[in-house]
Amino acid sequence: MASTLRSSPIPLILFLQLCFSFLSTTLAISSGSSDGYTINGRVKIESTGVKGFGLPGKTSNVKVILNGGQWVTFLRPDGYFSFHNVSAGTHLIEVAAIGYFFSPVRVDVSARNPGKIQAALTENRKGLTELVLEPLREEQYYEIREPFSIMSLVKSPMGLMMGFMVIVMFLMPKLVENMDPEEMRRAQEEMRNQGVPSLASLLPGAGRAN
Amino acid sequence: MARATRVFLLLLLVLLSSPSPSFSLYEDQVGLMDWHQQYIGKVKHAVFHTQKAGRKRVVVSTEENVIASLDLRRGDIFWRHVLGPNDAVDEIDIALGKYVITLSSEGSILRAWNLPDGQMVWESFLQGPKPSKSLLSVPANMKIDKDNVIFVFGKGCLHAVSSIDGEVLWKKDFADESLEVQQIIHPLGSDMIYAVGFVGLSQLDAYQINVRNGEVLKHRSAAFPGGFCGEVSLVSSDTLVALDATRSSLISISILDGEISLQQTHISNLVGDSFGMAVMLPSKLSGMLMIKINNYMVFVRVADEGKLEVAEKINDAAAVSDALALSEGQQAFGLVEHGGNKIHLTVKLVNDWNGDLLKENIGMDHQRGCVHKIFINNYIRTDRSYGFRALIVMEDHSLLLLQQGEIVWSREDGLASIIDVTASELPVEKEGVSVAKVEHNLFEWLKGHMLKLKGTLMLASPEDIIAIQGMRLKSSEKSKMTRDHNGFRKLLIVLTRAGKLFALHTGDGRVVWSVLLHSLRNSEACAYPTGLNVYQWQVPHHHAMDENPSVLVVGRCGLGSDAPGVLSFVDTYTGKELDSLFLTHSIERIIPLSFTDSREQRLHLIIDTDHHAHLYPRTPEAIGIFQHELPNIYWYLVEADNGIIRGHALKSNCILQEGDEYCFDTRDLWSIVFPSESEKILATVTRKLNEVVHTQAKVITDQDVMYKYVSKNLLFVATVAPKATGEIGSVTPEESWLVVYLIDTVTGRILYRMTHHGTQGPVHAVFSENWVVYHYFNLRAHRYEMSVVEIYDQSRADNKDVWKLVLGKHNLTSPVSSYSRPEVITKSQFYFFTHSVKAMAVTSTAKGITSKQLLIGTIGDQVLALDKRYLDPRRTINPSQSEREEGIIPLTDSLPIIPQSYVTHTLKVEGLRGIVTAPAKLESTTLVFAYGVDLFFTRIAPSRTYDLLTDDFSYALLLITIVALVAAIFVTWILSERKELQEKWR
């Protein structure tokens, strides 16, 4: 929960000179003028580059929001952002980036010992030693279409219907074969009494199979 | 192609409702049911960037706090940023030819954006002791050590900022001198600037400042005893013209080598018309200024030694651009005037009034109103003469590019500022028009289905996939102009802040018609008109089928709530304004009543600020219906400022306005006064008037029945501790609380009261059926929370048994009265929710059978669909087996955010302000319209489309199955015949 303090605004050029990828120093608060503090932080999106959509680490469409919309700011090319003129108290910072889920961050700006701050993710209560915000997870907005498989076709209503037909066609004769010859004869006699099965009498049977 | 198989099987519904996200979309389904439109709002400033070859663009800032880079050829958005709501853009410019510089928040935030891709390059926070006017000046050729300097005056200080990295080079505080800098003058080629401004109302100061270090080289001041009114315009690098306090004379101020000399000229001497107050119009024309007097616009030329002369006097309704520097020191400006249904665009040289460089007449749709702003830009034609293009902003906030006498492109940016939305039906399909026309021939139809089959079998080639997608998107059926069987096609009637009414087709989002409402235009009868709401006025369905439906647009003439009202009636099929009324009374509240007259016009009651009720439509028939129902009409008013809610009833005709039988006096019935030291009204929500509730009974486990307390007269009120009305972080948990109430608005009885300690607003709430869901901030946990309150009727609790209900042995037929004291029980539960919320709504379906979903507009401008079952007070950590069967989800401390249930999928509705839902005819489906700076429409099925085959349903597969089945039948038949024959031979 410790944080470093600097009284002057961040020398930005210094940051620009530093490498973009890993940069450990991030001070979170600097006491500015008499009327407020400055919260400085950084959003770090590691683009895995696996997914095609979303924004692969593009920082120009990311917004950082203080206290549910009181102030909105944007990221510099190196991912840094700052809020100026923030009063002492406990604030909430949210990051809005399509394709990523960020936890809101609670930031305590202390009035008694200026510059002392505490930051914690509100989703999992994890404390942050420095205000580097990283997405908790990537967000996949679309269902993944299952690749074509025989199973999916078989599972569909039509597939089931076909399957039933196949069973009837190939298993029924087998069942008939296994039947007792006497019973068979009886059944055949019954059938003969009813007459020859016609297509018309078969159709409702097929319908029942649906 | 989808066909409804209307089976209202509740069983099926229950089967389908599994806790998995019920809204989910495959990537290739984007655009099938949804559309998304991007806007920017009314343009305030525009800067062209056309010097270099390649992409020609114009950078604009708008009243919706948007900065955007637009393609000059087609009007498309290259990039766009929506700044925060408190971060209004003051000025924009381009520096170094590659950065867009914006000054916002009253001159305190300076940002640079990369011109090609819109990435923010740097941001500077400029501090100063006091608020003041803000000025941005980006001199073109000012170099200090290879750095271009930007001068900003804001918060009482003059800042010099490096344009490379935004570092403040120096700062000069003028707050002690209380100087309001009006102009920053940079004489060409010099190393100093002049800051000229007023001290108080009668003294003019000029500072000569060294650009390198901010050192004041010279300071001169001149007093003008008459006083200035504060309006000034710069006419050349050393001359200013100001208007005096009486607005009757102009003072030309020339600054030569830091010395100030004043010269006064009476306007009456110039114009010859001694009456009227002059207003100086902001302009940046060299050697010329504009004043507005008595509906005339006067161009005043400043000759040598500060002498003024009138160059031209033109009619008021015109717009003038800033001066544009052509080569060899020449400057041109554009002027747009109206004439009939055409606009006249002229481009003139500043120093030669009669030398028109360009004169064009362009036909203009009169629904766009008059021209508000014009920005011009030049290009060199092939014959080396100058060509001009003009960007104009119209009264309806639309943006048009004019070039060579034609409108090259136009953008309907009025749609970025929607005030209210209502859904309206399309005309019924006329007889004689065959529905089957869509499937023009069998071969095409089969080909289409073969393609689709290929798609489902994953055999399609990339070209095939494109063909399938194209086929789905342009399926002509969805954009037809007639009512469809499923009720997906409707018109969204949208009222914008410009006073323009648009009808958007739900199929593809196109504008069907648009009308600039005459009654909501700025006129002498109605100054500062503001639109308020749109209501369904006439929805013909039983009788009066031959009449077109119409909507009522309610507005106000003026800014205060006591300003007189305006009503306008618009036909929704044709977009014609049928009638408009300028009311004599004000509008405090509009109550659509549940009665309609013989022409299906809905009766509306308008309450004015004196608590008189006025009935519309003003027909004897309406009064007849109304008189009959008079004793049953109750209404309430929320006085949020005083912390009082009052209930009223109607008494009799107005005493004061005798003869006006449409006016009624009211009497107070009850009032609830919230203690002002501990509670302040933050939000009030009621149920939607047109909401349908399918059943009052709710079957719970063990065949028990609970009865929802479904009353139209319930009001949800949330109050907050007065200290906690500010932002998060301004109060401690100990001194902040929220109190929520459920109030019966007929009797004023409080049915439910609950205090949330350590919480604060903003509160967003929705009220539907017998439940309220509200969103607020918990200061102790420092997370957002959502609460649900459900209210049940206990007086019917004896009808516990489902069988009693089925057999009709119940007391449910006993009359329900709002006067009776209801025995109610409430249940509530709360959960954490991750995001801030901008808007909240609930789905609504035609019959109210389908389960509900909450639509939550998050801070990231996305819309999340959250099943109501997650907000069920009966959730427990370990639900019993029977409860699980009922569909109760085990309790978790926070609500899940499932990315697939974002209805906006990968899109953002920038600047989201509201979400509107409308039922489709199909019970399973709700139409959802989210609006802000962007518009987004989709349809969702909270319990999945149980009554509809999905779009990707393969008819071909069905056909093949049927054919296969028939073939199989024949085969088996033949086989059996043969076998029988063999049996016989045996």
Image (tube, coloured by chain):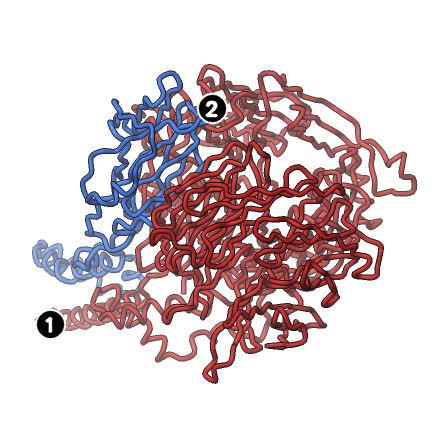
Relative to A24, residue B482 above or below: below
Relative to B139, residue B698 above or below: above
Quadrant into which the C terminus of chain B falls: bottom left
Q: Is residue B503 visible?
A: yes
For numbered disc 1, what is the local secondary structure? Answer: helix
Residue occupied by mark 2 = B730
Q: Residue furthest right?
A: B658
- Residue B293 in percent (x, y) is at 77, 57
From the viewer's side, name the closer residue of A78 and B677: A78
Badge 1 sits on which subunit?
B
Q: Based on the displayed image, in which of its 4 quarters is residue B299 positioned?
A: bottom right
Q: Colour of chain A?
A: blue
For numbered disc 2, what is the local secondary structure? Answer: loop
Q: Is residue B642 left or right of residue B492?
A: right
Badge 2 sits on which subunit?
B
Residue occupied by mark 1 = B982
Q: Residue at x 51, y 56 (%)?
A: B187
